[in-house]
Image (cartoon, grey):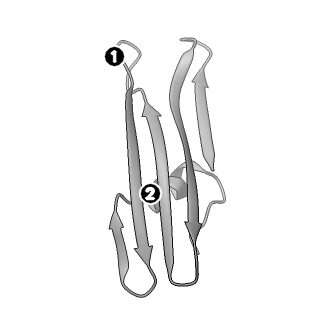
């Protein structure tokens, strides 16, 4: 999964993320890398997020699923 937003006006990447998701019936693991630039005069920041989700017990780590649902049209967690 991924998304890339590029500013033609400023000739630079504004936001980009890419990740992978693996899982079985009772668990799911998500790993996501993100680059985000909040203003044109400041350098961008890069982060790596990890989330482990256990069926029936909840999840541990960053809320990657919420970021993906907001950022990718039509993305839904199962």
Nearer to me, 34 or 66: 34
**Disc 2, SS:** helix
Name the residue located 41 percent from the left edge and 26 percent from the top edge: 37
Of the numbered discs in the image, which one, if any, rests on residue 59?
Answer: none
The image position of residue 46, as x and y in percent, is 39, 32
The vertical placement of 63 against 34, above or below, is below
The residue shown at (39%, 50%) is 49
The residue under the point 35% across, 57% down is 62
The image position of residue 8, as x and y in percent, is: 62, 15
Q: Residue pushed farthest bottom?
A: 56
> What secondary structure is marked by label 1?
loop
Residue at the spot of label 2 = 64
Mark 2 / mark 1, whichever is N-terminal: 1
Q: Position of residue 27 (x, y in %)?
A: 49, 77
Q: In the shown orientation, is residue 63 left or right of residue 15?
A: left
42 is higher (above) or lower (below) than 78: above
What residue is at 37 percent from the left and 79 percent from the top? Answer: 58
The crowd level at tag 2 (other Cα within 10 Å; few <14, some 14-19, many 20+) is some
Label 2 and label 1: CA atoms lie apart by 25 Å
CB-based contact (under 8 Å), mark 2 and mark 1? no
Residue assigned mark 1: 42
Q: Quadrant of residue 56?
A: bottom left
Q: Nearer the viewer, mark 2 or mark 1?
A: 2
26 relative to 1 in the view: left or right: left
Looking at the picture, how far across and down is residue 36, in whole percent? 43, 32
Total marks drawn?
2
Mark 1 neighbour class, 10 Å CA radius: few under 14, some 14 to 19, many 20 or more: few
| Residue 3 left/right relative to 29 | right
Q: Which image quarter is the C terminus in? A: bottom right
């Amino acid at each position: 999964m991924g998304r890339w937003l590029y500013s033609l006006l400023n000739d630079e990447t504004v936001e980009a993320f890419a990740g992978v998701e693996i899982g079985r019936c009772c668990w799911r693991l998500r790993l996501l890398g993100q680059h985000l630039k909040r203003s044109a005069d400041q350098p961008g920041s890069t982060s790596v997020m990890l989330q482990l989700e256990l069926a029936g017990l909840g999840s541990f780590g960053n809320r990657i699923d919420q970021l993906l649902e907001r950022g990718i049209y039509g993305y839904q967690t199962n």
